[in-house]
């Protein structure tokens, strides 16, 4: 049987050699089509291979009636509508490691070019000037590099910066003091990094949590004369705030490879002499392009020859037999993970998942993966899926333990998820109530009955007269409608909780106002 493969972004010819070698694959290279043209022809293809230019939108996926696999020759899958692909049963594979080295080297090239004003000096020389006064730079030695996001690329950059005799301080939600010590770098909160650094480089994915994480407030915390590098994703840095910070001389320079809108042409940031930029070239080396193209090509060949793919991003990985029993718990498991990740900010050291009741008779590993995915999603976004969740937990040194017992009290099945962090353990338990669907039935030691969906508020307070009323009044003032509310307490006058479901997302300013109320000492927003 023959399959039609469309390559819609430039890929290395050597890299697609595995595709050319395989039997029964018709390869079409068309890198010129617009999104509308792609949508009109995609129906004829079984596989689509892209880099970051092609936007694989829901519109395209809905027209892709024969598409079975999308290969992303690179890391970030933010140009692919993953939900739409999953809904349509299309597997997405990527090449997570192939361009790590090139992206790290590009970051170092940008760091050095920024420190020594090389692009500015070169432009001046090309324009016929021999100007040795305007381009005085700064040394890297003994300066502090702040790394925000210490994953594959961030860690490589940290390593190389030490070779330049820089001090390195990093923040990553999965970084512990012990791991930092082993790498010979300092460990801090994001604020510590922003305050200490002479150069700041970001290496996170673009997520709800990281969008504009480098904003006006962040610039305010930084040293005067700080220099900023972004070779990760446009949008992590607020470009307006960066422009203002350069104009006000708070920021001495910025090196940017990625932008909020790409192509990034004619933007006012490019008019500033302090800004140097490249057009998203982090992965543009022969080696990286060959490596990522080989990786996705091999996975496409594997897929069409019935073998397991190596780098699935969204592949459902359960047998039909197991699926029938455990599938109803998938959503609950993931949501309990998300719930706990919002309850406790500290670095997770261990995850214990207790399966009690009938479920304990089955292979529950897919549920464990879904729970871990929910827990890691807050910081990894689409980089974590049910296939790679366990692997990523291992990479971050998080122990994942499954415990089983066939006996339960009160429920036919009960899943209890516990995370152990340096700030202590937190727990949540959930079940499927016959005919009523998923429920969270315990948070730490408090018994609750919460439908795990929509917008939740978890409030800890001292059990004092008026505390509940004050919360209700403030939310009413903020026009936040309470749908349900439950309270629990350890003892009269002691530690107590309120668990509210509300009609809309509660904003940070509203949370801050809640925290100012007498007797309220913790407020967590959980959007499920
Ligand atoms: N410029 C380019 O051409 C190019 C090339 C390759 C990768 N990238 C981009 O570089 C980035 C990093 O890629 P990677 O392969 O290292 O990814 P990765 O998944 O290995 O690492 C990302 C890290 O960011 C951390 N993180 C998440 N939220 C955070 C937060 N709020 N604060 C601090 N850290 C946070 C995660 O814990 C993780 O360790 C991605 O955005 C990727 O798309 C760009
Ligand atoms: O395809 C490219 O050149 C960019 C790739 C890069 O941004 C990635 O996320 O892997």
Image: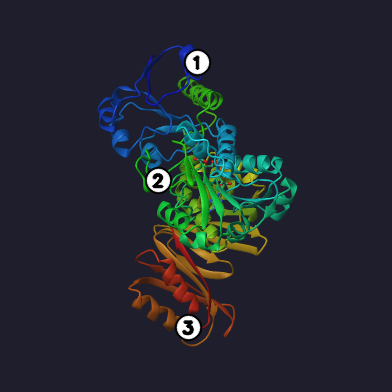
User: Mark on residue 271?
Assistant: 2
Residue 40 sits in quarter: top left
- The residue to which callout 1 is attached is 17
Measuring from the top left, give residue 260's x and y in whole percent. 40, 46
| Front label number (2 vs 1) | 2
Residue for point 64% across, 63% down: 425
Q: Which of marks 2 and 3 is nearer the N terminus?
A: 2
Q: Quadrant of the N terminus?
A: top left
Q: Are marks 2 and 3 in contact (CB under 8 Å)?
A: no
Horizontal relation, residue 509 to residue 163: left or right: left
Crowding near the residue tagged with mark 1, few <14, some 14–19, many ≥20 C-alpha atoms within 10 Å: some
Crowding near the residue tagged with mark 3, few <14, some 14–19, many ≥20 C-alpha atoms within 10 Å: some
User: Mark on residue 242?
Assistant: none
At mark 1, the secondary structure is: helix
Q: Is residue 429 above or below residue 316?
A: below
Using the image as rendered, state which of residue 469 and residue 185 is in the foreground. Answer: 185
Q: Is residue 73 above or below residue 121?
A: above
Residue for point 47% across, 44% down: 233
Mark 2 and mark 1: span between their CA atoms? 42 Å
Residue 62 sits in quarter: top left
Residue 371 seen in render:
no
User: Mark on residue 467?
Assistant: 3
Crowding near the residue tagged with mark 2, few <14, some 14–19, many ≥20 C-alpha atoms within 10 Å: few
At mark 3, the secondary structure is: helix
């Amino acid at each position: 049987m023959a399959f039609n493969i469309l390559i819609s972004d430039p890929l290395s010819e050597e890299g697609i050699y595995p595709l050319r070698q395989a039997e029964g694959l018709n390869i079409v290279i068309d890198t010129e089509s617009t999104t509308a043209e792609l949508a009109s022809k995609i129906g004829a293809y079984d596989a689509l291979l892209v880099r970051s230019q092609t936007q694989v939108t829901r519109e395209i996926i809905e027209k892709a009636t024969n598409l079975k696999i999308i290969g992303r020759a690179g890391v970030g899958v933010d140009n692919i509508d993953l939900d739409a692909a999953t809904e349509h049963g299309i597997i997405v594979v990527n090449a997570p490691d192939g361009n790590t080295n090139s992206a790290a080297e590009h970051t170092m090239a940008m760091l050095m070019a920024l420190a020594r004003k090389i692009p500015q000096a070169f432009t001046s020389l090309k324009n016929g000037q021999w100007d040795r006064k305007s381009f005085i730079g700064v040394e890297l030695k003994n300066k502090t590099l702040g790394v925000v996001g210490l994953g594959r690329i961030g860690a490589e950059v940290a390593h190389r910066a030490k070779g330049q005799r820089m001090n390195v301080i990093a923040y990553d939600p999965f970084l512990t003091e012990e791991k930092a010590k082993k790498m010979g770098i300092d460990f801090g909160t994001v604020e510590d990094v922003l305050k200490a650094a002479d150069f700041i480089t970001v290496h996170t994915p673009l997520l709800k949590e990281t969008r504009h994480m480098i904003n006006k407030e962040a610039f305010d915390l930084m040293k005067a004369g700080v220099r900023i590098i972004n070779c990760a994703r446009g949008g992590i840095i607020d470009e307006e705030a960066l422009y203002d910070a350069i104009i006000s001389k708070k920021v001495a320079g910025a090196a940017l490879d990625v932008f909020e809108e790409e192509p990034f042409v004619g933007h006012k940031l490019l008019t500033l002499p302090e800004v140097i930029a490249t057009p998203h070239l982090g992965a543009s080396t022969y080696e990286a392009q060959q490596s990522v193209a080989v990786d996705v090509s091999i996975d496409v060949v594997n897929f069409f020859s019935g073998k397991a793919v190596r780098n699935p991003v969204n592949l459902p990985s359960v047998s039909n037999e197991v699926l029938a029993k455990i599938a109803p718990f998938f959503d609950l498991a993931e949501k309990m993970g998300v719930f706990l990740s919002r309850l406790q900010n500290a670095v997770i050291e261990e995850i214990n998942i207790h399966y009690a009741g009938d479920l304990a008779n089955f292979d529950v590993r897919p549920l464990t993966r879904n729970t871990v995915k929910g827990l890691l999603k807050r910081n990894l976004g689409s980089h974590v899926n049910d296939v790679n969740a366990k692997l990523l937990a291992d990479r971050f040194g998080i122990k994942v333990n499954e415990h089983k017992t066939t006996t339960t009290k009160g429920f036919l099945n009960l899943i209890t998820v516990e995370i152990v962090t340096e700030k202590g353990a937190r727990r949540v338990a959930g079940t499927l109530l016959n005919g009523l669907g998923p429920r969270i039935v315990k948070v730490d030691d408090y018994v609750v009955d919460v439908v795990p969906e929509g917008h939740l508020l978890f409030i800890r307070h001292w059990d004092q007269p008026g505390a509940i009323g004050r919360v209700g009044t403030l939310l009413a003032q903020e026009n936040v409608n309470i749908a349900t509310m439950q309270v629990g307490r350890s003892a009269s006058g002691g530690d107590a909780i309120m668990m509210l479901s509300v009609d809309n997302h509660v904003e940070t300013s509203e949370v801050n106002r809640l925290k100012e109320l007498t007797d309220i000492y913790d407020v967590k927003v959980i959007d499920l």
